[in-house]
Amino acid sequence: MSEIVVAVDASRIRSGGGVAHLIGILNVSQIDVFGFKEIHVWSYQKLLDAIPDKSWLHKHYVVESEQSIIAQLRWQANKLPQEIRAHGCDILFSADAGTVCRFAPMIVLNQNMLPYDEGVLRLFGLSRDRIQQKIIYYVQKRAFLSATASIFLTQHAADQVQRHTGKLKHTQIIPHGVGQIFKDTRHRAQWPQDSSAAIRCLYVSPILEYKYQWVVVRAIELLRNRGHNLTLTLVGGGGRRAKKMLDRQLDISDPKREFVEVLEFLPHAKIPEYIADANIFIFASGCETFGISLLEAMAVGAPIASSNRSSLPETLKDGGIYFDPRDYLSIAQSIQELMDNPELRADIAKRAANLSGHYSWERCADETWRFVNQTYKAYVSASLVKN
């Protein structure tokens, strides 16, 4: 019998990966197979509009979710527990671990590794962003310690967080999925037969300090100075400080903007086509909880040169070659290796596409909701034993 009513707090989900995750796990046809009667979601209007309508799904608009961070946290701490109880919800699934809500039972999902990487945080300098990440660190740490259970996207993320929290009570590794549009798009870029045609490199990611776009530009410049005809397309909007760093490097490396193109906005539906037309996909992030953009390139079947940092080797495995994203010589060497070896390009692209088959939103949804069910039942059983 379906009796469990689930509350989902998505009031502070903003990243592309977080939005895709929420839509992916809610896009199921039935919830009674998980023992659920209803699911209630609290969020801001744009995200609620993007979530598919279901007879069992109830959407609640949170005015405070579009106000200041203080207003958001105050709502989480004071109003959310009241609303959860008012709607008869039995368990809270917080789609972001940065929550101050203390409802029980509660499952928190980790989707932000920045607060746990001091090396990356130093890139922000003494900035507002670094202070914000430090606050998030303490908020998340308290949430993990008070939660009934925690979900991580990778083992790397689980290990990193627990170095700061100590061993958590109940944890589960549930990776993200990848959109069907990427699986349905096949890599079609033909390798140039001579130097008159450019080798097209693509990097899809927001322009942030730890994404190292300016280092990739230096690597492409080095290869061009060696006589190779390469172009680079950077897709993603920028933070003010990181964009200035990139612009400074572009003024040095490509002052006439002859081989680097920056697209600050591209509709998500067009990204698969850009990946399909790229000869090499570059992903130079220094900190990722999972790497959804990397997974999307894997699904299309592009040859990938990836950062060796954070969780990325766990996601990509042997489906690409690796470099140190802080070192333009290392990046250039990896790109050169792909340029020189067509068999390697074909081999890693095939392996990456095969690996991406293990990542689906159907699997992610099934594992997530079954874990919610198990957590609730274990909590109820433990409560009965205590009483």
Image: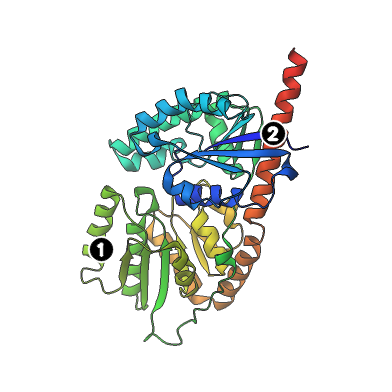
Q: Position of residue 34 (x, y in %)?
A: 72, 42
Q: Which quadrant holds the C terminus?
A: top right
- Closer to us: 288 or 2: 2
Q: Amino acid at mark 1?
A: Leu
Q: Is residue 370 left or right of residue 23?
A: right
Determine crowd level at label 2: few under 14, some 14-19, many 20+ residues with C-alpha closer than 10 A: many
Residue plotted at (36% across, 87% down): 196
Reply above or below: 177 against 134: below
Sequence-first tag of 2 and 1: 2
Q: Is residue 125 left or right of residue 62?
A: left
Callout 1: helix, strand or loop?
A: helix
Callout 2: helix, strand or loop?
A: strand
Q: Position of residue 85 (x, y in %)?
A: 57, 25
Circle 1 residue: 250
Q: Is residue 187 left or right of residue 207?
A: right
Determine crowd level at label 1: few under 14, some 14-19, many 20+ residues with C-alpha closer than 10 A: many
Q: Position of residue 54 (x, y in %)?
A: 60, 49
Residue plotted at (56% across, 74% down): 186
Q: Amino acid at mark 2?
A: Ile
Number of marks: 2
- Closer to us: 212 or 36: 36
Reply above or below: 322 against 272: above
* Rendered image: mark on residue 353: none
- Closer to us: 213 or 174: 174
Instruction: Say which of marks 2 and 1 sits in front.
Output: 2
Circle 2 residue: 4
Direction top: furthest residue: 387
Quadrant of the image occupied by residue 168: top right
- Look at the image and tell me whether residue 172 can be seen: yes
Q: Position of residue 129 (x, y in %)?
A: 32, 38
Reply above or below: 236 against 301: above
- Look at the image and tell me whether residue 309 can be seen: no
